[in-house]
Image: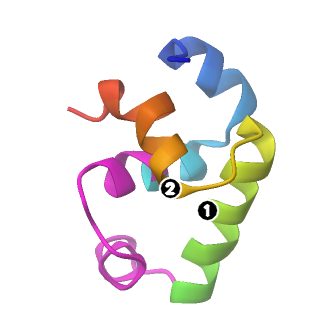
Amino acid sequence: MKRELKELAKVLTPAELLICKAVCRGFSNREISELYAISKRTVEAHRANIYRKLQIPSQSDLLKVKCGYAK
């Protein structure tokens, strides 16, 4: 189920990729919003878009798909 980073970059925006990396590092929505100086609602919207674009239902699935590239 892992996808290559290049494949994800074709589907996700640069902002969505940043959010993915932060989620994989264990940051909460609030922490991500503070880290990137964006609102918590913006983080939530990016995460919803990520799940929709990758056709996954949850954070645990995001971790399976993406976290190999978070380091």
Q: Are the residues tagged 1 and 2 within 8 Å (C-beta)?
A: yes
4 lies left or right of 67: right
Residue 29 at what x, y percent from top left? 42, 77
Point out the frontmost of discs 1 and 2. Answer: 2
Q: Secondary structure at mark 2?
A: helix
Q: Secondary structure at mark 1?
A: helix
Residue 36 at what x, y percent from top left? 38, 71
Determine whether 69 is above or below 32 in the image: above
Q: Which residue is mark 2?
A: 59
Magenta highlight range: 20-38
Residue 7 at what x, y percent from top left? 63, 15
Disc with the residue nearer the chain's start (1 vs 2): 1
Q: Main secondary structure of the magenta part?
A: helix
Residue type at mark 2?
Gln
Residue 35 at what x, y percent from top left? 29, 73
Residue type at mark 1?
Arg
Q: Is residue 22 magenta?
A: yes
69 lies left or right of 9: left
Label 2 Cα crowd, 10 Å radius (few <14 / some 14-19 / many 20+): some
Q: Which residue is mark 1?
A: 47
Asked whether residue 39 is in view, the answer is no
Q: Residue at x 56, y 13 (%)?
A: 6
Q: Is residue 23 magenta?
A: yes
Most foreground residue, 20 or 58:
58
Quarter of the image that includes the C terminus: top left
Most foreground residue, 27 or 38:
27
Quadrant of the image occupied by residue 8: top right
Determine whether 34 is above or below 51 in the image: below
